[in-house]
């Protein structure tokens, strides 16, 4: 909807208001800017303008000297890309520079003063798209929550699978959970892009300023969620070894891992709803308490590592819920002591 509205408005502004008889580049620039990843629209607009400027400078200069034709087109594109890269331009700038140079060489004999028209259209399309994105913005929290679902589901599902594998002493099931957890890089990249875009929208779009507090909590949580994923990988790896080495696995150990899965599920739910993650904290500490009981019941070397990783991952989830590091560590220590003290002597 944003792209459709921006394309129509850009055509109207460039054609009706600025009297461009053929304003085709304006809607192309508008759609290209809105098609950028969330959080990169301002940057994409600047890149669009820079790329057009470089393309116009190189293209018009060489067309004046060399004229138009196939080999002239090849030389212009080569030089436009080379100059853009030399100036430190990214892929978007390089693309715009090359495209503008191509259009100048191909159309200049038929369309006089194309350089000025192309530059004006680029400005119109870029700024119209920004105006549409800011006046009719998406809900940043909803977009972030939707992007977080795949990663959160993968993490919580594989922890739940590991808990079941520990209970059933099934090393293959635990190994499959580890393999699935290790393919989360693209999911986390999508979440980071959504966070960047949500932050841009909540900062610049007045109608979304009310989302800034909830979104800030999500942004601050992302680092700790990444840590939780990394520590969960270590946890699952040692769970596989504990099963394969036939170490003692008391029922409280899979219960602790299942508690981490519940805590991760609650974290996504509460952050997505903009609520304080109270249920996340409760379930994370309950998992730590169960891990303390498992250690008191007796585990082997790898089981001890699993217990330690339950504590570490729970601390990550507490940090993701907004608790400071020292307080999170204090709560984890107290939960461990509570779990140990509750065992019969």
Image (tube, rainbow, N blue to C red):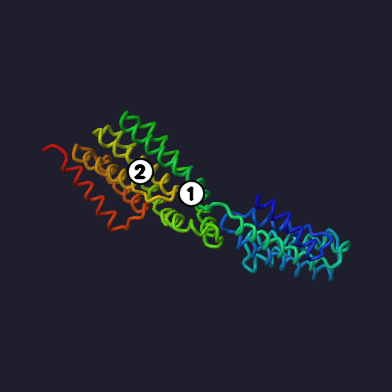
118 relative to 339 in the view: left or right: right
At which x and y percent is residue 193?
A: 53, 53
The local secondary structure at tag 1 comes to helix
**Mark closer to the chain start, 1 or 2:** 1
**Residue 262 found in image quarter:** top left
Q: Classify residue 31 by image quadrant.
A: bottom right
In percent of width and height, residue 41 lies at 61, 59
Image quadrant of residue 86? bottom right
- Distance between the alpha carbons at the discs numbered 1 and 2: 19 Å
Judge the density around disc 1: few (<14), some (14-19), many (≥20) Cα neighbours within 10 Å: many
| Label 2: element kind | helix
The vertical placement of 209 against 243, above or below, is below
Residue at image point 36% right, 47% down: 231
Q: Which residue is under mark 1?
A: 188
Quick one: 63 or 220, which is closer to the camera? 220
Question: As drawn, which residue projects farthest toward the right?
Answer: 110
Q: Quadrant of the C terminus?
A: top left
Q: Which mark is on residue 263? A: 2
Q: Is residue 113 above or below residue 345?
A: below
Camera-side residue of 107 and 244: 107
Q: Position of residue 132 (x, y in %)?
A: 64, 58
Query: Is 106 on the left-hand or right-hand side of 317?
Result: right
Residue 208 lies, in percent from the top left, at 53, 57
What residue do we see at 18% from left, 40% from top?
Answer: 296
């Amino acid at each position: 909807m944003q792209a459709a509205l921006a394309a129509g408005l850009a055509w109207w502004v460039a054609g009706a208001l600025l009297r461009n008889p053929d304003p085709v580049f304006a809607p192309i620039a508008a759609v290209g800017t809105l098609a950028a990843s969330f959080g990169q629209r301002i940057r994409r607009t600047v890149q669009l303008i820079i790329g057009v400027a470089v393309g116009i400078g190189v293209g018009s200069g060489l067309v004046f000297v060399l004229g138009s034709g196939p080999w002239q087109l090849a030389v212009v594109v080569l030089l436009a890309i080379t100059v853009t890269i030399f100036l430190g331009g990214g892929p978007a700038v390089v693309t715009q520079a090359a495209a503008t140079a191509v259009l100048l060489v191909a159309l200049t004999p038929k369309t006089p003063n194309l350089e000025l028209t192309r530059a004006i259209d680029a400005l119109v399309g870029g700024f119209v798209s920004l105006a549409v994105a800011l006046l009719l913005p998406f809900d940043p929290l909803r977009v972030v929550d939707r992007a977080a679902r795949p990663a959160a589901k993968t993490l919580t599902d594989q922890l739940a699978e590991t808990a079941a594998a520990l209970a059933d002493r099934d090393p293959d099931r635990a190994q499959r959970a580890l393999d699935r957890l290790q393919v989360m890089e693209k999911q986390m990249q999508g979440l980071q892009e959504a966070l960047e875009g949500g932050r841009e929208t909540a900062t610049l779009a007045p109608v979304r300023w009310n989302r800034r507090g909830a979104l800030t909590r999500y942004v601050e949580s992302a680092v700790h969620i990444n840590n939780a994923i990394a520590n969960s990988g270590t946890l699952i790896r040692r769970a596989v070894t504990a099963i394969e080495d036939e170490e003692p696995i008391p029922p409280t150990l899979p219960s602790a891992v299942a508690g981490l899965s519940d805590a991760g599920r609650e974290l996504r739910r509460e952050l997505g709803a903009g609520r304080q993650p109270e249920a996340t904290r409760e379930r994370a500490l309950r998992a730590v308490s169960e891990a303390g009981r498992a250690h008191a019941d007796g585990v082997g070397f790898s089981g001890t590592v699993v217990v330690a990783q339950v504590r570490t991952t729970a601390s990550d989830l507490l940090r993701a819920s907004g608790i400071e590091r020292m307080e999170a560590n204090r709560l984890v220590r107290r939960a461990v002591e509570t779990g140990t003290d509750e065992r019969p002597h």
